[in-house]
Image (spheres, rainbow, N blue to C red):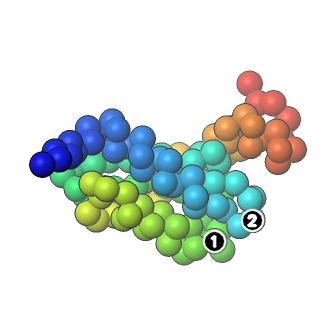
Amino acid sequence: MRIVRAPSTGELVSQIRDALRVAIDPELGHNIIDLGFVYDIAIVGDAVRITMTTTSPSCPTTCFLKEGVANILHVPGVGSVDIEMTFEPPWTPSRIEPSARASLGFAAIN
């Protein structure tokens, strides 16, 4: 008999973050983690709440990005996903990971 250990909350958050890297913003060409769109990942039982943003409240790719986030249902231990969109704090390019920022042509932000 094989015993399968459920991932710890920290491990599950890490697996979810990795899974979210496949959600690519079609306008910027980078994933939502590297772009800094994901503000929080909260887990209660097998329910996951993703708090995220986009570049602006009128972003035309919001529905597309939310569909990409919903794909984390394939991550073992995730039973449901709730996506909360927020614009507080507003997204700025300073949230972009340095390697993605450089490839997008943004100057270094201190």
Give the percent coordinates (x, y) of residue 100. Answer: 74, 43
Tag 1: residue type?
Thr
Question: Does 51 appear above or below 98?
Answer: below
Secondary structure under the numbered disc 1 in the rendered image = loop
Query: Which quarter of the picture shows residue 58?
Result: bottom right
Give the percent coordinates (x, y) of residue 81. Answer: 33, 63
Query: Tag 1 or tag 2, which sits nearer the N-term?
Result: 2
Give the percent coordinates (x, y) of residue 10. Answer: 33, 36
Checking the image for residue 6, the label placed there is none
Secondary structure under the numbered disc 2 in the rendered image = loop
| Distance (Cα) linking label 2 and label 1 | 8 Å
Residue at the location (74% across, 24% down)? 110
Query: Which quarter of the picture shows residue 93?
Result: top right
Residue that numbered label 2 is attached to: 27
Q: Residues within 10 Å of mark 2 (few under 14, many from 20)?
A: few
| Residue 37 in sight from this viewpoint | no
| Residue 41 in sight from this viewpoint | yes
Instruction: State left or right for residue 7 relative to residue 36.
Output: left
Tag 2: residue type?
Glu
Question: Does 84 appear above or below 12?
Answer: below
Checking the image for residue 61, the label placed there is 1
Q: Please state the total of marks drawn on the protein image.
A: 2
Residue at the location (82% across, 39% down)? 102
Labels 2 & 1 near each other (Cβ < 8 A): yes
Question: Does 74 appear above or below 64?
Answer: above
Residue at the location (57% across, 52% down)? 21
Give the percent coordinates (x, y) of residue 57. Answer: 59, 65
